[in-house]
Image (cartoon, helix red, strand yellow):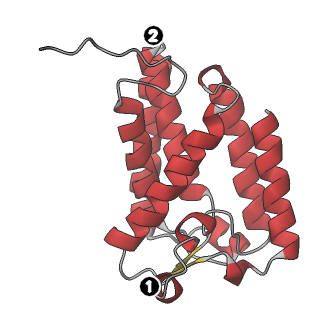
Amino acid sequence: MLWVITLSLTSLLLFFTVPNLQLSFDRPLIAEGEGWRIITGNLAHTNLWHLLLNLGGLAILYNLFRDYLGQAHLPLLMLLLWLAVGLGIWWWCPQTQWYMGLSGSLHGLFVWGAMQDIRHGRRTSGWLLLAGMGLKLVMDFYNAGDSPIATLINARIHIGSHLIGAGAGLLLGLHRVSLNEPVTHQPTRH
């Protein structure tokens, strides 16, 4: 829980002290060399509602999957998801000029956690969570990013980031070495 609190306080501090446009994913500025925006775009938010919704989602997901998130595993997982979402938007969403928020990464964390449920014998809950996420992504796509939440956060929902995040979470979840299991090396063949 310490990492959730740390990330939440850091996000709040950034929100109130650094203009969001200095952190947001901004394609022209990234192209000019401001590569950090690929990661910091996940920490920028359009308004306080956007930030609070994302931090609430993070807290809920942490509590749902805390059995799989050891002390230092959440920051590593989030960093990988931030990188995947930022690079994914850069490569696969060329029409996206700017992006802000944790929602893509939260979708990834959700899918990763569902995969951990399946891996650790909680197959019913894992498969139900994955099915629910699939339905949610289809509904997002069908609604084209328009929802009451879009009005609340003063921005369209970036469906691409949700798909990229979910895909990254799936790939990380499929990886045979999970973040909370010790790595064992296979003997090399000669």
Picture coordinates of residue 131 (x, y %)? 41, 35
Residue type (three-letter) at the residue carrying disc 2:
Gly
Q: Distance from label 2 to label 1 (Cα)?
A: 45 Å
The crowding category of the residue bearing disc 2, from other C-alpha atoms within 10 Å (few below 14, some 14 to 19, many at least 20), is few
Picture coordinates of residue 70 (x, y %)? 66, 25
User: Which residue sits at x=45%, y=10%?
Assistant: 121
Q: Quadrant of the C terminus?
A: top left
Outermost residue toward the left in this view: 190
Q: Which residue is mark 1?
A: 31
The crowding category of the residue bearing disc 1, from other C-alpha atoms within 10 Å (few below 14, some 14 to 19, many at least 20), is few
User: Which residue sits at x=75%, y=51%?
Assistant: 55
Query: Between 153 and 55, which is closer to the camera in this rendering?
Result: 55
Query: Between 75 and 92, which is closer to the camera in this rendering?
Result: 75
In this image, 25 relative to 46: left or right? left
Picture coordinates of residue 189 (x, y %)? 15, 14
Figure quadrant of residue 118: top left
Outermost residue toward the front in this view: 190
Q: Quadrant of the N terminus?
A: top right
In this image, 156 relative to 49: left or right? left
Figure quadrant of residue 124: top left
Q: Secondary structure at mark 2?
A: loop
Q: Which residue is mark 2?
A: 121
Q: Secondary structure at mark 1?
A: helix
Residue 162 appears in the figure? no
In this image, 73 relative to 174: left or right? right
User: Which residue sits at x=50%, y=83%?
Assistant: 33
Nearest to viewer (mark 2 / mark 1): 1
Residue type (three-letter) at the residue carrying disc 1:
Ala
Question: Could you say which disc has been placed on residue 184 in the image?
Answer: none
Q: Is residue 134 above or below residue 140?
A: above
Q: Is residue 41 above or below residue 94?
A: above
